[in-house]
Image (cartoon, grey):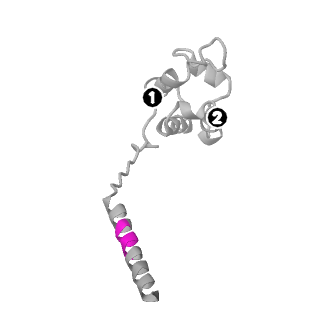
Amino acid sequence: MNQKLKRIRQIFIALILIAAVEGFSSCEKNSFAPPAVDPNQTWHFQTDIQPIFTANCITCHNGKTQFPDLRSGKSYASLSSGGYITPPGETSILYHQITTNSAHIPRSTDEQKLEVLYWINQGALNN
């Protein structure tokens, strides 16, 4: 009887190993690398940064309720006069808000956050 149980256990373990190997080998592994954001690229406020605000921020920051006013034509003055874009970018209020404030984090992508960071580190020019 003991031999029979030992043989059943060996068969059971073999079946589990075969199933595990099949399971792992049949899975497709998809890796997705997000597009790289080049910190050395020249970032422009009007063409790179304002579209981020327009797409993600002006629902609340529309000059009526929340400061700063991030509508096109008003956002740069509002950000600069409010002290939101002082280099280095890692410690600027704007970057801090979009990366740590739970109401702001999901609104923009990681790539957009890096673009804002690099723009601030390049001097936050109104270009």
In percent of the image, x 47 and y 38: which residue is there?
111
Q: Main secondary structure of the magenta part?
A: helix
Left or right of 62 in this view: 6: left
Counting the numbered discs, the total is 2
The picture places residue 119, in percent across and down from the top left corner, at 52, 35
Classify 10 Å Cα crowding around label 1: few (below 14), some (14-19), many (20 and above).
some
Left or right of 115 in this view: 7: left
Q: Which residue is mark 1?
A: 48
Q: Amino acid at mark 1?
A: Asp
Mark closer to the chain start, 1 or 2: 1
Q: Is residue 104 magenta?
A: no
**Label 1, label 2: how far apart the Cα atoms are:** 23 Å
Give the residue at the far top of this rendering.
Answer: 64
Residue 90 image-quadrant placement: top right
Nearer-the-camera pick, 60 or 94: 60
- Of badges 1 and 2, the one in the foreground is 2
**Magenta region, residue range:** 14-19
The picture places residue 10, in percent across and down from the top left corner, at 40, 80
Circle 1 sits in a helix, a strand or a loop, which is it?
Answer: helix
Nearer-the-camera pick, 36 or 40: 36
Nearer-the-camera pick, 124 or 11: 11
Image quadrant holding the N terminus, namely bottom left
Residue 3 vertical position relative to residue 31 in the rendered view, above or below:
below
Nearer-the-camera pick, 24 or 104: 24
The picture places residue 25, in percent across and down from the top left corner, at 32, 63
Q: Amino acid at mark 2?
A: Ser
Classify 10 Å Cα crowding around label 2: few (below 14), some (14-19), many (20 and above).
few
Left or right of 90 in this view: 29: left
**Is the Cβ of the residue at disc 1 closer than 8 Å to that at disc 2?**
no
Q: Which residue is mark 2?
A: 102
